[in-house]
C-alpha cells in the first residue's frame, strides 16, 4: 500500500511562522476542509490542537463531528446549520437568516468582491435588521478574498470594503462579534494583522502561494507521498513498459512497479512528459489505476515531498495535488 507521512516538526514550524504573522496562535483558525487538504482530517486536527490551536474551519457537519472534541469552535462553511455551542455556520443568504433557528451561532458572510458566496454589501443593513429583530446570535462576520495571492491591488480594495462592513456592524451596536477575512495568502502578505482570526489553509500544510515580490515566509511541506515496490523485472533494450508501451527501455535495465496510481489520486498526466519523483526517477510510461513503474528495486520510493513542484509539473496548484489523495491511503505522523 502506498502511504503518506505527515511531518509534525514541519507543521509546527508553519504554525510558528503563521502565529508570528497573526500576532498569536489564538488568532489562527486551521482550515481542515476536504480531509485537511488530503492530509488526513483527524491527524491534522489532533496535531493542531496539541500545538494549542483552538479554532477550526471545515466544510460539512460530518467533518465537524469527527474533530469537534479538539477545538473551542468549529466553523462550518457549507452545511445545514444546527444548534450546537461548539459549531458556528457561515450564512450567505438573507432567506436563511429569516428562517434559521435563533440559537444557531451565525457567522455572516459578506461578499466584498469575490461574487461567489455572501450577502451583498447593500444587503448588510437588512441582514443586521433581521439579526436584531429575530434575536439571532451573531457570532462572526466574515469575507473571502478573490486574489490575495496575486501581486495586484485587488486585495486592498476588498480589504477596504471589509473595513466598511466592520464599521457598519460595530456602529449598529453589535459587540463580541469576531471579524475575519484573511486566508493564507492574505495573512502572509499582511503587515500589522489586526483582525480577530485568520483562516489559514494551504500555508499550514507548507505552501506559500505568494509570487515573488512579497516578503518571503519560509514554509515547509507537511505531507510526503510514498509507494512500495510490488514487483520487479529485468528488461532488455527495446522492451516496453505499461499501457500503450509508451516507455521503451533504452538499455538493459531493472524496473519495478510501485503501488500508487490514478485510483489513489495521483495524476495520470502525460507519459511523454514524465514526472520525476523526489529522488529524481522518471515515472516510466503511463500511470495505471493502481501502479506506476520506476527504474531500480528500492523497496520504498518517495514520489512527492513538495506538492508545489508536482503541481507545476502537472499544470495545477498544490491544493489540488494533496486534496486529490484518497482518504484510504494510510497516513502516519513522523516527528
Ligand atoms: C478554503 C478557505 C480558506 C483557506 O484558504 P487558503 O488559501 O488555503 O488559506 C479560507 N476561507 C475560506 C472561506 C475558504 O473556503
Image (cartoon, rainbow, N blue to C red):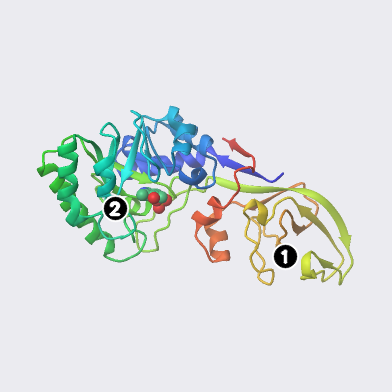
Tell me the residue at 29%/35% (across/down).
101
| Quarter of the figure with the C terminus | top right
Secondary structure type for disc 2: loop
Tell me the residue at 41%/40% (across/down).
15
**Numbered label attached to residue 67:** none
Q: Can you give x and y, in whole percent of width and height, for residue 328 in the image?
A: 63, 42
Q: Can you give x and y, in whole percent of width and height, for residue 331 in the image?
A: 61, 39
Q: Residues within 10 Å of mark 1 (few under 14, many from 20)?
A: many
Side of 233 where 169 appears, left or right: left
* Residue underneath mark 2: 118
Tell me the residue at 35%/64% (across/down).
150
> Which is more toward the observer, 107 or 6?
107
Tell me the residue at 70%/60% (across/down).
281
Side of 200 where 234 appears, left or right: right
Q: Can you give x and y, in whole percent of width and height, for residue 56 in the image?
A: 39, 38
Q: Does the residue labelled 1 lie within 8 Å of ligand 1?
A: no
Q: Distance between the residues labelled 2 and 1?
A: 43 Å
**Numbered label attached to residue 286:** 1
Q: Is residue 318 visible?
A: yes
Q: In this view, does 111 lie above or below 239?
A: above
Amino acid at each position: 500500500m502506498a502511504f503518506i507521512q505527515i511531518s509534525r516538526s514541519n507543521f509546527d514550524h508553519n504554525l510558528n511562522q503563521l502565529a508570528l504573522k497573526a500576532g498569536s496562535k489564538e488568532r489562527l483558525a486551521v482550515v481542515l476542509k476536504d480531509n485537511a487538504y488530503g492530509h488526513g482530517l483527524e491527524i491534522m486536527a489532533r496535531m493542531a490542537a496539541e500545538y494549542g490551536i483552538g479554532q477550526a474551519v471545515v466544510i460539512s457537519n460530518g467533518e465537524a463531528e469527527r474533530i469537534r472534541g479538539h477545538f473551542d469552535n468549529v466553523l462550518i462553511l457549507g452545511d445545514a446549520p444546527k444548534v450546537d455551542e461548539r459549531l458556528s455556520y457561515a450564512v450567505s443568504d438573507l432567506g436563511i437568516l429569516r428562517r434559521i433557528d435563533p440559537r444557531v451561532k451565525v457567522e455572516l458572510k459578506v461578499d466584498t468582491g469575490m461574487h461567489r458566496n455572501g450577502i451583498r454589501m447593500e444587503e448588510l443593513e437588512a441582514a443586521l435588521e433581521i439579526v436584531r429583530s429575530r434575536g439571532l446570535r451573531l457570532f462572526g462576520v466574515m469575507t473571502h478574498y478573490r486574489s490575495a495571492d496575486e501581486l495586484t491591488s485587488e486585495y486592498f480594495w476588498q480589504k477596504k470594503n471589509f473595513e466598511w462592513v466592520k464599521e457598519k456592524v460595530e456602529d449598529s451596536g453589535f459587540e463580541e462579534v469576531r471579524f475575519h477575512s484573511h486566508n493564507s495568502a492574505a495573512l502572509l502578505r499582511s503587515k500589522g494583522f489586526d483582525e480577530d482570526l485568520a483562516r489559514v489553509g494551504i500555508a499550514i500544510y507548507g505552501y506559500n502561494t505568494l509570487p515573488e515580490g512579497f516578503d518571503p515566509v519560509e514554509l515547509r511541506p507537511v505531507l510526503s507521498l510514498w509507494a512500495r515496490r510490488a514487483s520487479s523485472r529485468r528488461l532488455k533494450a527495446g522492451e516496453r513498459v505499461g499501457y500503450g508501451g509508451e516507455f521503451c527501455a533504452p538499455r538493459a535495465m531493472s524496473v519495478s512497479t510501485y503501488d500508487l496510481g490514478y485510483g489513489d489520486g495521483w495524476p495520470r498526466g502525460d507519459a511523454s512528459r514524465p514526472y520525476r519523483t523526489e529522488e529524481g526517477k522518471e515515472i516510466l510510461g503511463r500511470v495505471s489505476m493502481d501502479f506506476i513503474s520506476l527504474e531500480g528495486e528500492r523497496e520504498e520510493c518517495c514520489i512527492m515531498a513538495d506538492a508545489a513542484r508536482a503541481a507545476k509539473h502537472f499544470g495545477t496548484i498544490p491544493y489540488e495535488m494533496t486534496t486529490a489523495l484518497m482518504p484510504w491511503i494510510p497516513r502516519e505522523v513522523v516527528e
